[in-house]
């Protein structure tokens, strides 16, 4: 089934991303995950630049395919069109930010990818609404809404909204990695839960005949 295949490819996105971060850190002498941004692994001329930039482009491509799978999968589960479409667009835009980031490594100003990363904050909320009352994916729904809340709070802290000054040079990398987890882990859950729900629906349909 096409939807399930696309979703499983999409689920690889977060796994590739975490793998690239770990491998890039090992390849970069002196790199500190606590104090340095993830994108510093891909900065021009760095020892892990090729691995990191190609890796995050692969992540973005997987997310875009997963976004299409999410739309198709939710339609097959009987959901409406608007919310799955909005969720898919947000996921795809988030994926596009990875591709642009890989094409334009630091210190290129285009590395910010037109701030499309903010779509990654909206995506879990839209996905939660798209999954509606589907009990088959209740775990993915819960993680999606928790991820939205966590990513929104972390983004506000990192942008110093409210002036609390919680992020410092000594821990900026840790805050960013928390944000990464909040914006990506829910995808791994949803992209694996929906194929399971589709398979269960197909088994029920077959048993009825």
Image (cartoon, rainbow, N blue to C red):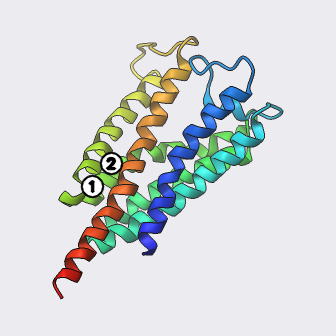
One can see residue 68 in this view: no
Question: Going 42% across and 49% down the picture, which residue do you hit?
Answer: 188
* Direction from residue 44 to residue 101 in the image, left or right: left
Q: Residues within 10 Å of mark 1 (few under 14, many from 20)?
A: some
Tell me how many marks there are: 2
Front one among 164 and 208: 208
Image coordinates of residue 73 in percent, x first then y, are 36, 68
- Secondary structure found at label 2: helix
Give above or below for 133 relative to 165.
below
- Quick check: can you spot residue 113? yes
Return the residue at label 2: 125
Out of 58 and 95, give the one closest to the viewer. 58
Q: Are marks 2 and 1 in contact (CB under 8 Å)?
A: yes
Does 47 appear above or below 198?
A: above
Q: Is residue 150 left or right of residue 2?
A: left
Q: Which residue is mark 1?
A: 129
Q: Quadrant of the N terminus?
A: bottom left
């Amino acid at each position: 089934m096409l939807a399930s295949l696309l979703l499983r490819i999409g689920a690889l996105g977060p796994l590739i991303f975490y793998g690239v971060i770990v491998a890039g850190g090992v390849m970069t002498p002196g790199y500190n995950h606590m104090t340095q941004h993830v994108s510093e692994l891909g900065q021009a001329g760095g020892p892990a630049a090729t691995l990191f930039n190609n890796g995050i482009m692969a992540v973005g491509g997987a997310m875009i395919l997963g976004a299409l799978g999410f739309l198709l999968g939710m339609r097959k589960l009987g959901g409406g069109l608007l919310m799955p479409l909005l969720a898919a667009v947000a996921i795809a835009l988030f994926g596009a930010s990875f591709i642009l980031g890989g094409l334009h490594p630091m210190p290129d100003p285009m590395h910010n990818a037109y701030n499309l990363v903010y779509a990654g904050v909206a995506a879990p909320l839209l996905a939660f609404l798209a999954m509606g009352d589907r009990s088959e994916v209740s775990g993915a729904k819960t993680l999606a809404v928790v991820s939205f809340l966590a990513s929104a709070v972390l983004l506000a802290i990192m942008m110093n909204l409210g002036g609390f000054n919680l992020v410092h040079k000594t821990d900026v990398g840790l805050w960013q990695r928390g944000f990464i987890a909040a914006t990506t882990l829910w995808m791994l859950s949803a992209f694996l839960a929906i194929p399971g729900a589709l398979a269960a629906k197909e088994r029920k349909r077959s048993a009825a005949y």
